[in-house]
Amino acid sequence: MTGIPIPPTEVRRHPDRARYDRSAIDAVLDEAWICHLGFLDDGHPVVIPTIHVRVGDRLVFHGSPASRMMRWLRAGGPVSVAVTILDGLVLARAVFDHSMNYRSVVLFGKGEVIEDPAEKLEAMRVFTDKILPGRWDEARRPTDKEFRATTMVAVPIDAASAKIRTGPPMDAPEDTALPVWAGQIPLRLAAGEPIPADDLPDGVPLPDSVRRLLG
Ligand SMILES: Cc1cc2nc3c(=O)[nH]c(=O)nc-3n(C[C@H](O)[C@H](O)[C@H](O)COP(=O)(O)OP(=O)(O)OC[C@H]3O[C@@H](n4cnc5c(N)ncnc54)[C@H](O)[C@@H]3O)c2cc1C
């Protein structure tokens, strides 16, 4: 498994949309809430949606030691990770030219288990604060049992590319006079009204982290 070569990261389809600099790659990794991680299970490709966080030069994943994804990563198996931020719909005159605006990253690599307790705790902090910045300081910290029940695995950000599409539809010149609306519909994720847990005791105030999120 360890001898499998890393595939080329050079973007061949629409190379004009490619970025290979770490600032562009990190910006997508940090802003995206989730990723999709591909691995092999009994020789069959499986792609699993999951949370990722970037800790320095590594992309970190967490989960139960029993999950297939974690077992594969722990064993140092090669993975492919796709991270996507959807920015908008691109509506062209011709159905053929419809598209989406996006920022995405594809990463190839192998997992390394984070064994060092301090490093693991720091990765847990980054995870929690990714879900909502400031949450680590508000919520109860992991017990020893919870700490042991969580596997954290890091994949180095060595073999990665970003691909970014922005801008209007690209209709053929002969289509631009057609009476069909064309343009972009920007999309974004937005937080809704908080829904307190059914068993929340009376008098527990909305935390600062949520207030900041709601602006
Ligand atoms: C929201 C969204 C919607 C898309 N919809 C479509 C669609 O409907 N049909 C379609 O064909 N394509 C779509 N794409 C583009 C798609 O991700 C691929 O880039 C494209 O299919 C070409 O794949 P390829 O492996 O043939 O490219 P190649 O250029 O041959 O890929 C070579 C290498 O480039 C890198 N790479 C390729 N794609 C990406 C990427 N998106 N981000 C970062 N690195 C990349 C990888 O390292 C890959 O191994 C979409 C992308 C996004 C993010």
Image (cartoon, rainbow, N blue to C red):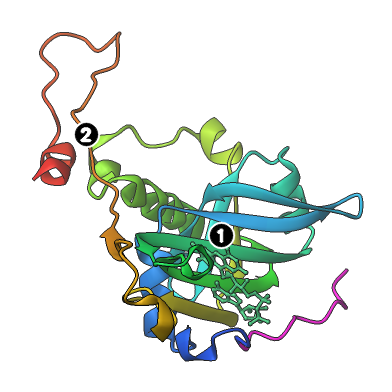
Which residue is outermost to the right? 42
Above or below residue 10? Residue 185 is above
Q: Is residue 105 magenta?
A: no
**Camera-side residue of 164 and 198:** 164
In the rendered structure, which segment of residues is drawn in magenta? Answer: 1-10
Residue identified by numbered label 1: 116
Whether residue 130 sits left or right of residue 40 in the image: it is left
Q: Secondary structure at mark 2?
A: loop
Where's residue 203, x and y in %? 10, 13
Above or below residue 77? Residue 7 is below
Q: Secondary structure at mark 1?
A: loop
Where's residue 107, x and y in %? 60, 72
Seen at 79% across and 58% down, the residue is 75
Q: Is residue 9 magenta?
A: yes
Q: Which mark is residue 192?
A: 2
Q: What's the magenta bit mostly, secondary-structure-wise?
A: loop
Where's residue 83, x and y in %? 51, 63
Seen at 29% across and 34% down, the residue is 139
The answer to which quarter of the image holds residue 102 is bottom left
